[in-house]
Image (tube, coloured by chain):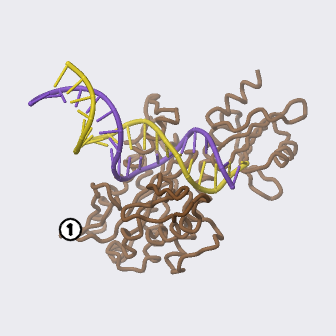
Chain colours: A brown, B yellow, C purple
DNA sequence: TCAGGGCTAACAGCAGAATG
DNA sequence: CATTCTGCTGTTAGCCCTGA
């Protein structure tokens, strides 16, 4: 890493689209690699059959806590990196007040330079939706970026430590905060609910406000959900700056990849419980639809008639089809025919359902 | 069927009402 | 009058369920 570039970027002296790309392609890959090292992961691991809550009610707060820990660790690693490069006059500081953003690069004088808002999403969470609800007025277009960390528990990567599993970062996404907010507001303001009555959806001085039947109320916490910010091909568009186009590209990629990664983890994990051998891609009509092991397969977003054709083609015993929220439909072979034995199931129940059907 | 509106836990804490 | 209880604040990430 080049020291001069580093200093320029952290001082927010480059164009936002250039800074975005540097953070995405140069900076965070290094931070992520360090986070994923055994020496780092071991501090977050689960050992000796330690369990975390399995019920949905309490899963969320483990994920919330992991979010805070990842945010802290990224900054800690960053602060470790700076002096290694001979940069000693700036440092990452934690914003302890509950306000945007999370981390700020500061000079000893206290001057704030680059600022980062960190979000964490666990791959296999059924609805990944941290909120980015900071109002446009509070975002500095020259210094502010939104960083999304995609992570999950992973049992691999241990040479010395005997953990059962430890968190692994799979990808870090970088968005220009102001552009992301522009996409969000362009979408939100142009797609209000149907029953507005005489009111308008908009903003108070502090937060987003919704209307139902003419009655105004503080928005309920859906505004800015990361998975709902923008849709490809939406009729209305914000002003197209280089940083906006960069952020839009990254967002559309993000939308696809975060869903696929969770599916991959769930499918591979469950296939290994259903059989032995190697896992291959599930190809059909030149399309990669999921994963195949022996006579079991997992596919994503496949309709019933296509699922039946795939099952017949591969002579499957078990076929699990998942939606984007990982709701599962389970098909099972029965005397040469395929039967839908479960629908709308959570992933955690699928293997049991398949095994019980066998008995 | 699925987008999206409604709502949740945990966190630390405050203000004001109810109780002994 | 002092203590305890109730209901609310706002932030994190995410599940539930309904209406189009």
- The C terminus of chain A - image quarter: top right
Image spot of residue A239 (x, y percent): 53, 80
> In the rendered image of this protein, does residue A185 appear above or below residue A301?
below
For mark 1, name the chain. Answer: A
Question: Residue A104 appears in which quarter of the rendering?
Answer: bottom left
Image spot of residue A147 (x, y percent): 44, 61
- The N terminus of chain A - image quarter: bottom left
State the residue at coordinates (55%, 48%).
A123
Foreground pick, A140 / A14 = A140
Foreground pick, A276 / A140 = A140
Question: Residue A98 appears in which quarter of the rendering?
Answer: bottom left
> In the rendered image of this protein, does residue A218 appear above or below residue A164?
below
State the residue at coordinates (65%, 37%).
A270
Question: Residue A207 appears in which quarter of the rendering?
Answer: bottom left
Image spot of residue A283 (x, y percent): 78, 53
State the residue at coordinates (80%, 35%).
A340
Q: Is residue A72 left or right of residue A261?
A: left
Question: What crowding class fits label 1: few (fewer than 14 Cα within 10 Å), some (14-19), or many (20 or more)?
Answer: few
Foreground pick, A155 / A218 = A218
Foreground pick, A242 / A221 = A221
| Residue denoted by label 1 | A110
Image spot of residue A140 (x, y percent): 36, 72
State the residue at coordinates (33%, 57%).
A75
> In the rendered image of this protein, does residue A275 appear above or below residue A241?
above
> Disc 1 on helix, strand or loop?
loop
């Amino acid at each position: 890493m080049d020291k001069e570039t580093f200093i320029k970027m952290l001082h927010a002296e480059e164009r936002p689209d250039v800074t975005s790309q540097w953070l995405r392609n140069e900076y965070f890959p290094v931070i992520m690699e360090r986070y994923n090292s055994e020496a780092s992961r071991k501090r977050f691991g689960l050992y000796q059959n330690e369990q975390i809550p399995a019920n949905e009610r309490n899963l969320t707060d483990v994920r919330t806590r992991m979010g805070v820990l990842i945010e802290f660790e990224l900054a800690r690693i960053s602060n470790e990196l700076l002096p290694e490069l001979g940069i000693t006059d700036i440092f990452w500081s934690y914003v302890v007040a509950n306000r945007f953003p999370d981390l700020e690069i500061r000079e000893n004088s206290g001057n704030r330079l680059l600022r980062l808002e960190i979000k964490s999403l666990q791959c296999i969470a059924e609805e990944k939706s941290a909120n980015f609800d900071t109002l446009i007025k509070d975002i500095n277009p020259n210094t502010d970026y939104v960083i999304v960390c995609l992570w999950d528990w992973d049992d691999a990567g241990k040479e010395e430590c005997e953990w059962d599993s430890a968190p692994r970062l799979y990808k870090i996404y970088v968005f220009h905060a102001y552009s992301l907010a522009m996409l969000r507001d362009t979408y939100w303001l142009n797609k209000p609910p149907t029953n507005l009555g005489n009111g308008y959806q908009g903003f108070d001085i502090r937060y987003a406000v919704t209307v139902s039947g003419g009655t105004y109320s503080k928005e309920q916490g859906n505004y800015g959900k990361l998975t709902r910010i923008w849709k490809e091909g939406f009729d209305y568009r914000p002003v197209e700056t280089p940083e906006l186009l960069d952020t839009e590209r990254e967002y559309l990629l993000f939308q696809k990849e975060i869903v696929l990664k969770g599916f991959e983890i769930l499918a591979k994990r469950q296939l290994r419980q259903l059989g032995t051998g190697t896992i291959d891609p599930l190809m059909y009509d030149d399309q990669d639809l999921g994963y195949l092991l022996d006579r079991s397969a997992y596919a994503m977003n496949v309709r019933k008639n296509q699922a039946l054709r795939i099952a017949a083609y591969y002579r499957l015993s078990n076929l699990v089809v998942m939606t984007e929220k990982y709701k599962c439909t389970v098909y099972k072979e029965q005397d040469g025919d395929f039967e839908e034995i479960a629908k709308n199931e959570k992933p955690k129940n699928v293997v049991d359902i398949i095994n019980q059907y066998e008995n």
